[in-house]
Image: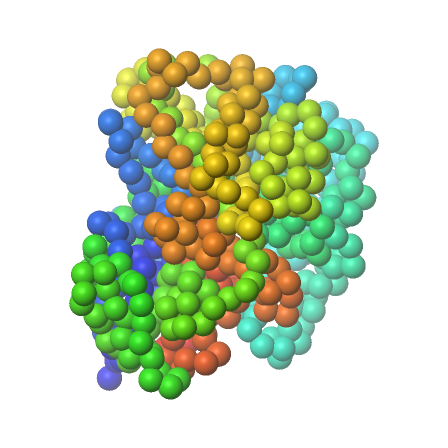
């Protein structure tokens, strides 16, 4: 007999947990606070523009394919991906833009051309990660690293030997690369997991490796097509999905969670609860207060513009002079980086259907601190917005207010209020409060025997492929 399972939150992690729990024979109800599922990956329609206001760089499509295969389905019947010919167009101030090619050989040749002194080390790094990546598949991607015994797995020990954990990430990068172009490209990746370049975070090197080795993709219909496909599969499998049902509290009896209270005054009971909402936020509903410092978040601006901005690819990175000062401000002072490196996603450059004819659908993203005592995010927006617009203008992408159909802003306050992220962080607590000071938090609650977690604040970590795996991990613990 299956258990009665309630999944809280219909983001990609919650959808994955619901699917895997249903495949295991459980009776599953998914409760979502918004009008539709998808969480931060859900599409928005604004004045004829289709927005992807969350994750944009899509990698590791094999993880989605594995989910559909586990359900006895062919992914192509639900979800199709297009591999991009260029990973990103990178603009370095004072230089012509560079297109990072999708193929490894082409990338190695590009490094040989732009930074010949670093080419040998780049090839050596890629070869080193060739050996490490299968070990990660067999450990971090296969099951949680949630107890000391897991760290004695020979494969995990080989990962430690294959990656230099003695040095900080910045020391590793600086030791390998003298080129400021390569340093600028690599410095940002620790923040994708809520860490800094002063962290011992060699695993962050796997992100650019996977982008180069396996490719960057675009889902047909936009990023929002991913949760739509998972929702369709979940419904086919018999998952009951309730939208417009925001969780506002939980009730426990000793070590057992009994109820989740909803904003409409109703409540849901279950034998097992799986929360796809930030772990620390979920525990706060049960009376547990955390003094942890949050890790990082994002400041984003989305515009619909009544003209094409020439020179942009789908993914673009604007790297100004003084970018190291920006990283120092962000990582060491926990303030908005000045000058900011700005990621620009121009969806209409790849998918014209995402905007009215002749228009641009532009999404600007800057890694930022989360909600910190020394930052007034309500008052910070004009300064952060001006810094983003200045960087864009410095690279020739000025925006005339008269040509803007809409502007949409997301700050850590938005992520906290709308998506339940702990103090607006997309990655949970700062690394000193992580499991063993290294890993995202556990998928099983240590106190409540019937409470499990999925999503970007728990193992294996942030990013859409990882939250798919987190849902699989949580369902396996039911």
Residue shown at the point (18%, 61%) measured from the top left: 264
Residue shown at the point (26%, 56%) measured from the top left: 33
Residue shown at the point (40%, 35%) measured from the top left: 409
Up-down relation of residue 447 to residue 64 (above or below): below
In this picture, residue 132 sits left or right of residue 26:
right
Up-down relation of residue 36 to residue 119 (above or below): below
Q: Is the C terminus in the top left, top right, bottom left or bottom right quadrant?
A: bottom left
- Can residue 8 be seen here? The reply is yes
Up-down relation of residue 111 to residue 124 (above or below): above
- Can residue 25 be seen here? The reply is no
In this picture, residue 229 sits left or right of residue 55:
left
Q: Position of residue 27 (x, y in %)?
A: 23, 74
Q: Position of residue 326 (x, y in %)?
A: 65, 35
In this picture, residue 457 sits left or right of residue 138:
left
Q: Is the N terminus in the top left, top right, bottom left or bottom right quadrant?
A: bottom left
Camera-side residue of 271 and 215: 271
């Amino acid at each position: 007999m299956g258990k009665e399972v309630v999944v809280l939150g219909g983001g990609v992690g919650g959808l994955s947990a619901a699917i895997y729990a249903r495949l295991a024979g459980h009776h599953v109800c998914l409760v979502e606070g918004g009008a539709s599922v998808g969480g931060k990956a859900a599409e928005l329609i604004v004045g004829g523009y289709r927005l992807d206001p969350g994750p944009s760089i899509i990698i590791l499509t094999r993880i989605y394919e594995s989910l559909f295969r586990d359900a006895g389905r062919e992914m192509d019947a639900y979800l199709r991906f297009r591999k991009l010919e260029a990973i990103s167009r990178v603009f370095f101030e004072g230089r012509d833009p560079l297109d990072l090619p999708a193929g490894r050989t082409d990338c190695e040749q590009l490094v040989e051309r732009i930074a010949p002194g670093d080419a040998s080390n780049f090839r050596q790094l890629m070869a080193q990660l060739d050996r490490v990546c299968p070990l990660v598949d067999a450990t971090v991607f296969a099951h949680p690293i949630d107890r000391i015994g897991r760290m004695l797995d020979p494969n995990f020990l080989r990962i430690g030997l294959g990656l230099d954990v003695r040095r900080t990430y910045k020391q590793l990068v600086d030791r390998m690369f003298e080129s400021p172009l390569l340093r600028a490209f690599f410095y940002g990746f620790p923040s994708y997991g809520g860490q800094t370049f002063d962290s011992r975070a060699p695993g962050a090197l796997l992100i650019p490796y996977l982008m180069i080795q396996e490719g960057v993709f675009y889902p047909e219909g936009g990023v929002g097509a991913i949760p739509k496909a998972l929702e369709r599969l979940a419904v086919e499998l018999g998952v009951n999905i309730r939208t417009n049902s925001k969780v506002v509290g939980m009730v426990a009896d000793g070590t057992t969670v009994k109820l989740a209270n909803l904003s409409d005054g109703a409540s849901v009971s279950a034998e097992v609860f799986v929360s796809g909402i930030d772990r620390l936020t979920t525990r706060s509903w049960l009376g547990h207060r955390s003094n942890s410092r949050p890790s990082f978040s994002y400041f984003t601006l989305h515009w619909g513009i009544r003209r094409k901005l020439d020179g942009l690819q789908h993914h673009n990175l604007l790297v100004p002079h003084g970018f190291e000062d920006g990283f120092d401000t962000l990582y060491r002072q926990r303030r908005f980086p000045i000058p900011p490196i700005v990621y620009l996603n121009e969806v209409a450059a790849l998918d014209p259907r995402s905007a009215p004819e002749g228009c641009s659908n532009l999404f600007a993203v800057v890694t930022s601190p989360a909600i910190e005592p020394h930052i007034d995010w309500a008052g910070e927006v004009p300064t952060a917005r001006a810094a983003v617009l200045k960087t864009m203008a410095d690279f020739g992408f000025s925006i005339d207010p008269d040509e803007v159909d809409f502007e949409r802003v997301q700050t850590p306050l938005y992520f906290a209020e709308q998506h339940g992220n702990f103090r607006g962080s997309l990655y949970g607590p700062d690394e000193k409060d992580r499991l063993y000071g290294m890993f995202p938090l556990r998928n099983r609650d240590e106190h409540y025997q019937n409470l499990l977690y999925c999503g970007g604040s728990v193992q294996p970590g942030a990013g859409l492929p990882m939250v798919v795996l987190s849902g699989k991990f949580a369902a396996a613990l039911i």
